[in-house]
Image (cartoon, rainbow, N blue to C red):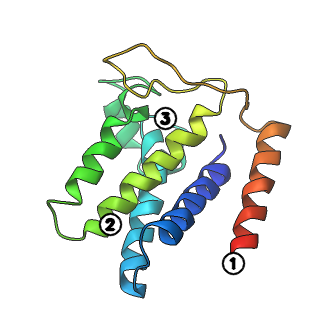
């Protein structure tokens, strides 16, 4: 998926969280949103062409020594750790935002033809869909999410 589609997924997941699980005050909402925005970018940290890697180019070079793209960074283990951290460290809404942003990215990637292995390396289970990056189908999905967001405002 393209970055803007991943961003919309993150916003959508954030809206659903606020509407159904917690009604934060403004300070909490900002802390959560910062975590959400960082979280949606993190799964592609091992991809040199990703938005985050373009800002900090040394990181994918180091990470690629240990894993490949859509390896461990495209699993559910990292957002589980973030969510667990929300019970241990200060700023729990930051870590919850990280986890939800991360999961939003993984969910979007599950819809792509490349898919993800959510429980790698424990299982070879792969979840994938039919959306190709930049395709007409991705554009339809993008417009559907924008429509939903605008209708919920």
Left or right of 109? Residue 125 is left
Q: CA distance from mark 3 to mark 1?
A: 34 Å
**Residue 94 locus on image (x, y percent):** 32, 66
Query: Residue placed farthest to the right in the image?
Result: 136
**In this orientation, does residue 55 appear?**
no
Q: Which residue corresponds to the image point at 31% horizontal and 33% vertical from the top-left?
A: 62
Whether 42 is drawn above or below 125: the answer is below
The circle on residue 94 is: 2
- Judging from the image, what secondary structure is the residue with disc 3 in? loop
Please name the residue that numbered disc 1 is placed on: 153
Q: Find residue 30 and name its label.
A: none
Asked which secondary structure carries label 1, the reply is loop
Single out the residue that lies furthest toward the bottom: 26
Q: Nearer the viewer, mark 1 or mark 2?
A: 1
| Tag 3 near tag 2, CB within 8 Å | no
Task: Kindly state the secondary structure of the residue where label 2 is placed.
Answer: helix
Residue 59 shows in the view? yes
**Horizontal side of residue 80 vs 43, given as left or right:** left
Viewer-nearest residue: 134 or 102? 102
The residue positioned farthest toward the left in the image shown: 88
The residue labelled by disc 3 is: 47
Q: Which is nearer the N-term, disc 3 or disc 2?
A: 3
Please name which of the two marks, 3 or 1, marks the residue nearer to the observer: 1
Alpha carbons under labels 1 and 2: distance apart: 23 Å
Q: Residue 106's spot in the image, x, y percent?
A: 50, 39
Q: Residue at x 36, y 22 (%)?
A: 120
Give the position of the C terminus as an image quadrant.
Answer: bottom right
Work out whether residue 148 or residue 101 is closer to the camera in this orientation and state it.
148
């Amino acid at each position: 998926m393209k970055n803007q589609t991943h961003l919309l997924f993150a916003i959508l997941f954030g809206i659903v969280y606020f509407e159904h699980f917690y009604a934060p005050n403004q300070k909490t909402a900002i802390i959560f949103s910062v975590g959400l925005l960082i979280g949606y970018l993190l799964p592609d940290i091992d991809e040199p062409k990703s938005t985050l890697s373009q800002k900090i180019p040394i990181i994918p070079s180091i990470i690629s020594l240990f894993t490949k793209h859509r390896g461990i960074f495209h699993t559910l283990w990292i957002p589980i750790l973030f969510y667990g951290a929300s019970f241990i460290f200060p700023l729990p809404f930051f870590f919850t935002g990280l986890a939800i942003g991360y999961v939003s990215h993984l969910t979007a990637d599950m819809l792509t033809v490349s898919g993800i292995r959510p429980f790698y390396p424990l299982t070879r289970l792969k979840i994938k869909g039919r959306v190709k990056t930049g395709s007409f189908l991705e554009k339809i999905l993008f417009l559907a999410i924008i429509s939903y967001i605008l209708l919920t405002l």
